[in-house]
Amino acid sequence: MLLKGCLHCHTTCSDGELTPQEVAEAYAARGYDFIAFTDHDHLLSRRCQEIYARVRSAMLVFVGVELTVFERGYLHVNRIPGDRETLHVFNHLGEYDLPLPKILERLQALEQRLPIDAVEITSKGFRHQEFEVPAIGYPKIATDDSHTRQMIGRAWIELEARRTKDAILRAVKGNDFWNCYV
């Protein structure tokens, strides 16, 4: 089954402008099959898990978190749990304003702390081709990292998989997906 999804979006549970329900409705209206709420760890509201649990959607909805990791400055890593699988994505490489050798140093340091499975080659949905290189030996995903309604739908992934959380995460880990951009 062909599935369309976003593995990085924000809600009012941290610094997004839309509630989790509004985010789910906006992605569903654009034909998405799955999304991952990845609100910032240090900004999470106290009741966010309760709020996420009330979201009603025909999409598969992952509830992850965007971790702030301090490694020669701050870095962001999404942790997205499925039912048994967990995906860790080193986020928005282009936003650190670092050349490739410095990104590789940060990635190597992150690998000592977290099981990195993929890297995000977009910033706010805009592609950074300079990171689409073999030196970064991980699957490279596109997301829109939405914080507002206008950001939704700039970049996403598509994949052929069963419609389960773990099948989607395994496809990403196995680099069995396509990046798509507006």
Image: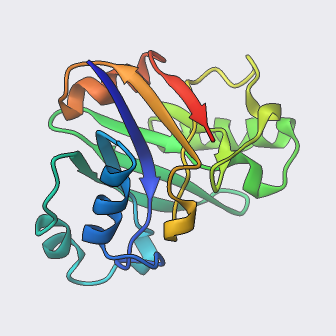
Question: Which residue: 46% across, 75% down?
Answer: 16
Relative to 22, 139 lies left or right: right
- Location of residue 180 by image quarter: top right
* Quadrant for the N terminus in the image: top left
Residue at the spot x=22%, y=45% of the render? 59
Instruction: Residue at 52%, 61% (x, y): give it.
Output: 146
Whether residue 23 is situated above or below residue 48 in the rendered picture: above
- The residue nearer to you, when weighing 10 against 1, is 1
The quadrant the C terminus occupies is: top right
Q: Classify 62 as above or below 45.
A: above
Image quadrant in which you'd find residue 111: top right
Which residue is outermost to the bottom?
46
Work out whether residue 72 or residue 16 is closer to the camera in this orientation and state it. Answer: 16
Q: Disc count in the image?
A: 0
The picture places residue 60, in percent across and down from the top left corner, at 21, 43
List x then y, in percent, for residue 62. 26, 49
**Residue at the spot 76% in from the left edge and 56% down from the top edge:** 96
Instruction: Tell me if 97 is positioned left or right of 134 in this view.
Output: right
* Left or right of residue 79, residue 86 in this image: left
Foreground of the two, 22 or 122: 22
Colour scheme of the rendered structure: rainbow
Q: Nearer the viewer, residue 159 or 68?
A: 159
Q: Position of residue 122 (x, y in %)?
A: 66, 44
Residue 111 against residue 147 in the figure, above or below? above
Residue 83: image x %, image y %?
A: 15, 37
